[in-house]
Image (tube, rainbow, N blue to C red):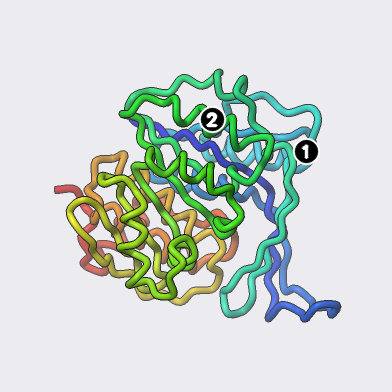
Amino acid sequence: MSRLLHTGQVIVDLAMALDTLPRSGADALAHSASFHAGGGFNVMAAARRNGLTTLYLGRHGQGQFGELAREAMRAEGIQMTLPIDPHKDTGLCVALTEASAERTFISCIGAEGGLSAQDLAQVTVLPDDYVYVSGYSLLHADKAQSLLDWILGLTPGVHLSFDPGPLLADIDPQLLNALLPRLNLWTSNSTEAQGFTGLTSLAQALPALTARLPYDCLTVVRDGPQGCWISDCHGQQHIAGFKVHAVDSNGAGDAHAGVMIAALAGGYNAAQAATRANAAAAIAVTRRGPATAPGAREVDALLAKSGSVGTQE
């Protein structure tokens, strides 16, 4: 049975809702504030809620934020492969969501920013596992090279997924150039795809992105409420989104990625998996908070209501 091995970072989100961000030096009152497990937790929760056994390979710290992160992972049935790091607490991200549903993040990295070859050597990787890599991981000097070396040592049958994230331009090009030929799945939003290719339109960026990736790599580019585009060796296809009233876009991309991987691992083809991922992201944006991905039954219900095809052949 396939598993998701998540190599990214679980941090704690301080989520705050406000009308609009203040200008530099000004002040603003938030309508709400709450602490949640976030970062890589969002992807793992989405996958786990959609039936995929999930393991967190990253570090988690000693302190109040580390304990909050562990409680959240235990509640979702996510397995942790490492003991508590006694030297640091888990990091914190201030997630500011405006009335427009746009979000802004400010992060401070903790224990999750490190990962050694010895940490990774404790992991037994099975041939049908799905390994998830976050672009954030490639920004941390105490993690990037050991993680890349471990990835390049995986057997070819292990599925490798990569979400570059919004700081893609800050990743060392040598690390990216070593990672890209190994990918089985690229999942990003349109802004990241355009930034990576240096092109100003999604129509131009899609083929340019595909050209940078292995021939058999599935490329998924999210396009907000429009849905997503998928590209593989069979060509390019637009998968329509679902019309909903969005209140918070925080975590929508993570919900999409987690459900996409869970669906692929469950035997759905690329178009079916992307349809399920679009449905999950649509449900997620109707809820406030970071880890708002729905379970498989909720996804099924939306697909049935809309008449979309997201079932296996």
Which of pointers 2 and 1 lies earlier in the amino acid sequence?
2
Q: Residue at x 84, y 80 (%)?
A: 26
Quarter in which the N terminus is drawn: top left
Residue at image position (67%, 62%) is 105
Of badges 2 and 1, nearer the viewer stands: 1
Q: Residues within 10 Å of mark 1 (few under 14, many from 20)?
A: many
What x and y, as percent, mark residue 176? 49, 45
Query: In the shown orientation, is residue 99 left or right of residue 258?
Result: right
109 to 277, vertically: above or below: above
> Visible in this render: residue 16?
yes
Location of residue 277 in the rendering, given as x and y in whole percent from the top left corner: 36, 56
Viewer-closest of 151 and 271? 151
At which x and y percent is residue 40? 56, 46
Q: Quadrant of residue 256?
A: bottom left
Residues at marks 2 and 1, CA–CA distance in whole angstroms: 19 Å
Q: Percent x, y for residue 32?
A: 72, 68
Q: Which residue, given by chain and number where applicable, does mark 1 sit on?
A: 89
Residue farthest toward the left in the current orientation of the protein: 313
Say which residue label 2 marks. 79
Q: Are marks 2 and 1 in contact (CB under 8 Å)?
A: no
